[in-house]
Amino acid sequence: MTSTGTYQRDGKEIELLPFIFQHPSLPSLRNKPEEILSLIEEFDRTHKKLITIGHARGELIKGVIAERKPATMVEFGGYVGYSAIKFGDALRKAGGKKYYSLEIDPIFAAISNLLLDLAGLRDVVQILVAPAQVSLARLIKEGLVNEIEILFLDHWKDRYLPDLRLVESLGLLKPERSILVADNVPRLVESPYLTWIKASPEEKKEIQKDLTPPKAGELRKLIEEKEEKELETELSDVAGNPDIVYETVVHDFQSGARLDGVAITKVVG
């Protein structure tokens, strides 16, 4: 994804489908998430690179799911479904009920749904196709999400902070219960997202001094009354809750020639 909110598809994601569905091992793949993940990794190694979370970082996050045992997990940025398969399977094994994958690109969502069906995870994973803030509003409006136990951020990097502030303002994060997991957040590269979660309440008030904090219940009322296209703009840049206190550890990973990272953040107060 680019910082401008676009991703130039070159066809490799669609090529993944015949690679899997015409693979000699196809008859034995159904309802076996790990084997499907292995084929996606094989395609990435031997054919064309995909921008998935990958095995190493994915295993780290699987460990978080196994430890926290969330009933519900939400991801922003589903791509071709690698993370939804990996984490949806982990959530189910941990006793969880629902994994919501928010993906803006309908082609990526379609690819994900086909692979999720093959993996036997369509009852656990639901994909919503729209900008993240619109899909989040839909989940709230339909009463499907009132709290986010684990939020996985892997969409456009310039949307990490605005979308986190929206989640904060909607009261979806709970101290000692909620975890944020953000991919592509190297420890030594400062970003608006890292600056925010590391900042004190006073510093965060200064960061968002040009934004007017929503009044109690204002955003939820807006969600109830507005159409989705209106919400895309209305919810795109709202003030967050500066009083939320986070505790963050960034795990470094080598990604080719560059250092990458996964930030795991606990809501502590």
Image: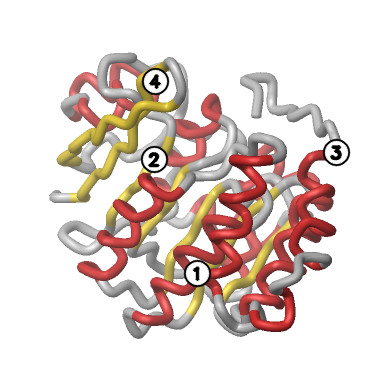
Return the x and y of residue 244 as percentages of the image width and height.
23, 43
Cα separation, mark 3 vs mark 1, equals 24 Å
Cα separation, mark 3 vs mark 4, equals 32 Å
Q: Are marks 1 and 4 in contact (CB under 8 Å)?
A: no
Sequence-wise first label, 2 or 1 = 1
Mark number, residue 192: 4
Residue type marked 1: Glu
Q: Which residue is mark 3?
A: 11
Could one spot residue 235 in this view of the protein? no
Nearer to us: label 4 or label 2: 2
Sequence-wise first label, 2 or 3 = 3
Colour treatment of the image: secondary structure
Could one spot residue 21 in this view of the protein? yes
| Residue found 74% across the figure and 51% down from its top | 130
Judged left or right of residue 190, residue 222 is right
Q: Is residue 8 above or below residue 71?
A: above
Q: Which residue is mark 1?
A: 34
- Nearest the eye: 54 or 92: 54
Q: Are marks 2 and 1 in contact (CB under 8 Å)?
A: no
Sequence-wise first label, 3 or 4 = 3
Cα separation, mark 4 vs mark 2, equals 13 Å
| Residue found 45% across the figure and 64% down from its top | 87
Sequence-wise first label, 4 or 2 = 2
Q: Are marks 4 and 2 in contact (CB under 8 Å)?
A: no
Judged left or right of residue 264, residue 53 is right
Nearer to us: label 2 or label 3: 3
